[in-house]
Image (spheres, rainbow, N blue to C red):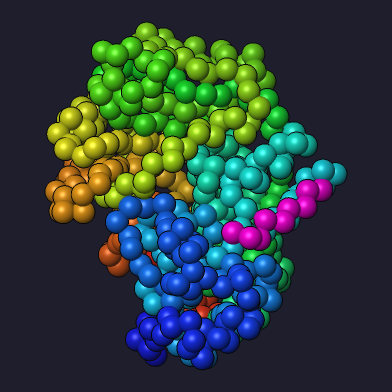
Amino acid sequence: MSMIKQQTILNANPASPLTSELRALFNDRLITPDDSRYDEARAVSVGGIDSRPAAIVRVSNASDISQLVSLAREKGIELAVRSGRHSLAGHAVTEGGIVIDLSGMKGIQIDCKEFIAWAETGLTAGEYTVAAAEHGLATGFGDTASVGIGGITLGGGVGYLVRKYGMTIDQLLAAEIVTADGELVYADHESHPDLFWAIRGGGGNFGVSTRFQFRLHEVDTILGGMLILPATPDVIAGFIAEAEAAPDELSTIVNIMPAPPMPFLPKDVRGKVVVMALMVYAGDINDGEKVLVPFRALATPLADMVRPMRYPEIYQPEEGRPPPIISSRTLFVDSVDRLTAETILGHLNASSAAMSFAQLRVLGGAMGRVPADATAFAHRNSRIMVNLMALYGDPKQKAIHESWVTNFADALRQNDGGAYVNFLGDTSEAQIRAAYPDKTYERLAAIKAKYDPTNLFHLNQNISPKE
């Protein structure tokens, strides 16, 4: 029987037996609805989500996690696991269940001789990157500093070093995981290889990852930053063509969006759709300058902030505004030609959201040289990732913006029917199956049945245990 069917809604009364039991185990690390820290502790990075867990526990180690997992399994309580709380679907919080908050687990050990790091999963990508950069080293994550390394790693990890060194999961050497039976399991290519395969792209379906061992690379000074160009069909198509032709050292994240009121942009540009590209050349700076010449020649830049910098500087400052509600879709496309670029501009100009954008990430390079069946992320031959988002504040407008992103995605869809699990929101079974092709899904379902037969860990892009 699925754990979803037998989920218990906890009594949040501070004097309830279960709350008293949790208080005895965790003392002031337990946060309940009567606690002044509660609203901050249950908040997620996406607006419009107001789930109220009965208990939030800020765990310190694997033993804490094991106790909570065992308790939840025995009593049929829903569990949510949060590392950086960035799940677009709000999976980092539960209604009436227990949240395992990993944010206090930030230990990291770096071995400069062996180029490896052991990192606890409460670390954010930014915290890990800063710690590794003190030694001139790096592991590639995504493009946002506040994302927890737990979630981004389990889903894949596509960021600034993806073409040079592959996805985050391609740098993962081992993991420690508390499985549904409350046991701490060490997984790598030799020990529990089935589980190690599954967690490299299969998300949080298989347990609570407590520590990761990553490969480190020598990445100190990069050529990186933001290049903003006018958004015309020729510029968009030309940019993607140049990014595909560039050497592996160059990874780009292209946001086609209305220009925000940045002080370095002319006033007459603000609000107009522009190409806002984040670029990282992880190699010789002089070679990088030559590689960037054709990008700068596409049009007169509206702003050119690409320069030599330390790798952690590429992470953009994050605003402290209330999180917006997000309607999103993710897909892969085979090409972006002039007609596709016109379609992108047409849909962006028709959006009524406070902010909307199309993000294009050219893939390939080291990521594409990994066999498709080597990890649970199977889309190694996909060429370009597209993420479409509408950001807004009024939940009553959800239907409007959901329709917009759906139509936008349908207009761009080509031959590649896949999807990237880390960018899926509150999705249907069909979208999850797009993230995991049939053979991959069947293999994951069998591993799920072995390690989590009752689907205790179902607050994720869920894979049902194979019956």
Q: Which residue is drawn at 48% across and 88% down?
A: 16
Q: Can residue 381 be seen in this snapshot?
A: yes
Q: Which residue is drawn at 57% across and 17% down?
A: 307
Which image quadrant is residue 221 in? top right
**Region rendered in magenta:** 103-111
Q: Residue at x 33, y 12 (%)?
A: 266
Q: On screen, 447 above or below 231?
A: below
The one nearer the camera, 381 or 361, is: 361
Left or right of 400? Residue 358 is: right
Left or right of 169? Residue 346 is: left
Q: On screen, 445 above or below 236?
A: below
Q: Position of residue 72 (x, y in %)?
A: 51, 84
Left or right of 362? Residue 66 is: right
Q: Position of residue 398 (x, y in %)?
A: 19, 53
Q: How many labels does the image show?
A: 0
Q: Where is residue 372 in the image (x, y as percent from the top left)?
A: 50, 54
Q: Can residue 450 be seen in this snapshot?
A: no
Q: On screen, 352 above or below 151?
A: above
Which image quadrant is residue 274 in? top left
Q: On screen, 303 above or below 365?
A: above
The one nearer the camera, 363 or 47, is: 47
Q: Determine the residue located farthest toward the right in the rendered image.
A: 113
**Quadrant showing the C terminus:** bottom left
The one nearer the camera, 345 or 14, is: 14
Q: Which residue is drawn at 39% across and 41% down?
A: 321
Residue 195: within the magenta? no
**Quadrant showing the N terminus:** bottom left
Left or right of 434? Residue 76 is: right
